[in-house]
Amino acid sequence: MLNVKSLGRVVVAGAALFSLLLISGGDASARPQYKKPFEAAYPDLVKKHGTNGKLSCAVCHPVKDKKKRNDYGVALTKALGKKSEKDAAKIKAALKKVESEKNADGKTYGELIKAGELPGKKDAAN
């Protein structure tokens, strides 16, 4: 039977579990410094492929493992030239630079974006 003491334990345990889920759960963006400029540069893609005005990390990452990148993610990483770049101007310049690069199918990422397609292949993982 629940008394005040055991009810308090249940409440504390529930709050602790909820906190752990809140901290570890969800599909949060680990690198908003890349995601936000991408969404600002390509609002039509956000409208077509986004949810609540935002794109998922799948633009650059084909799987939930954020260490894996698709072909577009690899090209963008190379264009950035530095891991964890935070300079917004350099990120925007890298996005523009990658537009002219071709994927394995011979199309430029800029052509794919203008056609309303996400630039990275979902099945590519590096």
Image (tube, grey):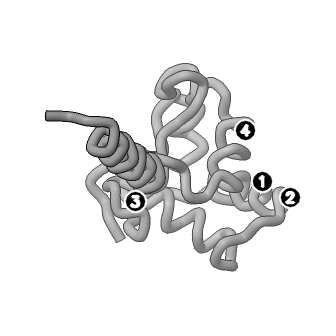
**Mark 3 or mark 1, earlier in chain:** 3
Camera-nearest residue between 115 and 82: 82
Q: Which residue is mark 2?
A: 89
Dot label at residue 70 = 3
Residue 47 horizontal/vertical position (percent)? 57, 20
**Mark 4 or mark 2, earlier in chain:** 4
Q: Which residue is mark 1?
A: 92
Distance CA(mark 4)–CA(mark 2): 12 Å
Tag 3–tag 4 contact (CB < 8 Å)? no
Mark 4 crowdedness (10 Å alpha carbons): few <14, some 14-19, many ≥20? some
Distance CA(mark 3)–CA(mark 2): 23 Å
Q: Mark 3: which amino acid?
A: Asn
**Mark 3 or mark 2, earlier in chain:** 3
Residue 75 horizontal/vertical position (percent)? 54, 65
| Number of on-image labels | 4
Q: Secondary structure at mark 3?
A: loop
- Name the quadrant of the C terminus: bottom left
Distance CA(mark 1)–CA(mark 4): 8 Å
Distance CA(mark 2)–CA(mark 1): 5 Å
Q: Which residue is mark 4?
A: 41
Q: Is residue 33 left or right of residue 26?
A: right
In the displayed structure, would residue 121 be above or below residue 126? Answer: above
Tag 1–tag 4 contact (CB < 8 Å)? yes
